[in-house]
Image (cartoon, rainbow, N blue to C red):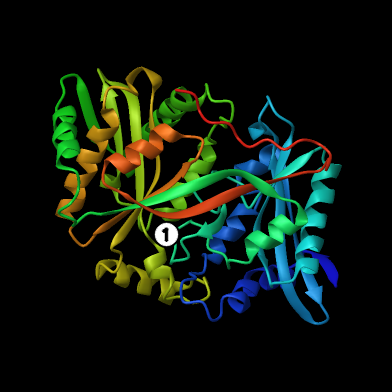
């Protein structure tokens, strides 16, 4: 077997075509948009390159590409209280431990040469909204940006020495269900009408203001947690740019208390319900027109909650339920949407897990973020639970 670094167009093409082979008989798999993946590895498109770098490799057996991987880091997001950890992602491989180990070795050796002492994966070279975690339960068609893998991938990781750093749970709500908890929604309606609180949707015309408010809320809501990593403004702008075709302004909400931003909620339509018709993730003018036609025909019936945050001062005021009340009113009007996916919440965040359950959602799937320590004699520790 031979390791090949992705440095030319031929290798880039092979990088994208490998999943077509691995998932050729899997009806649940949906191809990622090649353009969006390539943007991640483009220094002109990904702000992670300002303080970081990335490499990609393929593994070749005779004349066949049978595996791929990427390794990357962004020094601005390294947790100060722990050891320096790089990332790996976009891993795809046939069920061959030797091939997988060669890929992991290539990533480990490069990250070690850059001063890192461990690697997490599979993760994204960007925010954790997309391409994050190894699917270990709930092998169904995933929502847009959620990872899908063959079940044997977990064994490939564990045989190499990766261990579970934390689990990521996703929940689904049937919007049409008559069994949603009536008491919760009555309280939510009351909270949504409280004096001095104002709810407002995202606006493309005011996206700079919206991004600023998002960053303000996110920093206040999460900066006290030891695993906090600030969100890059350019990453958010890129997310809005890449998803503008399908974003719904009234799927993104902000809450203000006396004009001060205190909470946000971001949800997107499940683009995978359209992308599955493309087969290979390639885009051209004809295919863009096809996607717009399918959107117009209301083929997308599911939406995915990406992130929600509330500043500490208001975290026990019920604002979360007020947000869910607002978004439910939107979905009742857009009645072709009948399912909401809440993905994902880490096992280190029991408060958010309780909130997801309280709105009537049902557990759907589990992903895992794995960690590999380069010092094989060092004790392994899982990510600790967020303290109340």
User: Residue 90 lies in what quarter of the image?
Assistant: bottom right
Residue placed under numbered mark 1 in the picture: 143
Q: Position of residue 107 (x, y in %)?
A: 78, 53
Please tell me how crowded label 1 is: few (under 14), some (14-19), or many (20+) other residues with Cα within 10 Å: many
- Is 25 situated above or below 214? below
Q: Which image quarter is the C terminus in?
A: top left
Residue 45 visible here: no
- Is 82 situated above or below 60? above
Q: Position of residue 97 (x, y in %)?
A: 76, 67
Q: Is residue 288 left or right of residue 96?
A: left
Q: Position of residue 31 (x, y in %)?
A: 51, 69
Q: Position of residue 198 (x, y in %)?
A: 21, 27
Task: Count all numbered tags in the image, as a single digit.
Answer: 1
Q: In the depicted view, which residue is nearer to us: 65 or 118? A: 118
Q: Is residue 77 left or right of residue 347?
A: right
- Is 156 situated above or below 88? below
User: Residue 49 lies in what quarter of the image?
Assistant: top right
Q: In the depicted view, which residue is nearer to us: 159 or 72? A: 159
Secondary structure beneath label 1: loop
Residue 280 visible here: yes
Q: Is residue 223 left or right of residue 7?
A: left
Residue visible at 46% across and 77% down in the picture: 27
Q: In the depicted view, which residue is nearer to us: 116 or 249? A: 116
Residue visible at 60% across and 35% down in the picture: 383
Q: Is residue 321 left or right of residue 87?
A: left
Q: Which image quarter is the N terminus in?
A: bottom right
């Amino acid at each position: 077997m031979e390791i090949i670094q992705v440095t030319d167009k031929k290798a880039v093409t092979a990088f994208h075509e490998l999943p077509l082979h691995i998932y050729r008989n899997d009806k649940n798999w949906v191809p990622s948009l090649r353009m969006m993946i390539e943007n991640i590895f483009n220094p002109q498109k990904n702000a992670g390159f300002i303080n970081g770098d990335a490499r990609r490799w393929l593994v070749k057996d005779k004349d066949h590409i049978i595996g791929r991987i990427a390794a990357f880091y962004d020094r601005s997001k390294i947790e100060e209280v722990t050891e320096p950890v790089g990332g790996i992602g976009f891993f795809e491989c046939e069920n061959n431990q030797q091939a997988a180990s060669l890929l992991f070795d290539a990533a480990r050796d490069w990250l070690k040469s850059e001063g890192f002492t461990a690697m997490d994966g599979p993760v994204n070279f960007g925010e954790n909204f997309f391409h994050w975690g190894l699917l270990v339960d709930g092998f169904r068609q995933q929502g847009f940006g959620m990872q899908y893998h063959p079940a044997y991938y977990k064994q490939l990781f564990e045989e190499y020495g990766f261990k579970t750093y934390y689990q990521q749970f996703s929940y689904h709500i049937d919007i049409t269900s008559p069994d949603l908890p009536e008491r919760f929604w009555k309280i939510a309606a009351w909270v949504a009408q409280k004096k001095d609180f104002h709810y407002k949707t995202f606006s493309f015309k005011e996206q700079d203001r919206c991004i600023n408010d998002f960053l303000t809320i996110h920093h206040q809501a999460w900066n006290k947690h030891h695993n906090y990593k600030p969100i890059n403004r350019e990453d958010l702008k890129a997310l809005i740019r890449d998803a503008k075709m399908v974003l719904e302004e009234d799927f993104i909400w902000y809450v203000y208390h006396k004009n001060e931003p205190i909470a946000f909620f971001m949800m997107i339509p499940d683009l995978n319900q359209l992308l599955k018709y493309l087969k290979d993730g390639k885009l051209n003018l004809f295919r863009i027109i096809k996607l717009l036609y399918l959107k117009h025909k209301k083929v997308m019936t599911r939406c995915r909650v990406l992130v929600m945050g509330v500043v500490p001062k208001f975290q026990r005021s019920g604002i979360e339920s007020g947000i869910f009340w607002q978004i439910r009113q939107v979905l009742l009007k857009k009645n072709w949407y009948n399912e909401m996916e809440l993905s994902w919440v880490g096992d280190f965040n029991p408060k958010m897990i309780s909130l997801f359950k309280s709105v009537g959602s049902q557990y759907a799937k589990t992903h895992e973020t794995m960690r590999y320590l380069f010092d094989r004699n060092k004790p392994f520790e899982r990510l600790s639970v967020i303290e109340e």
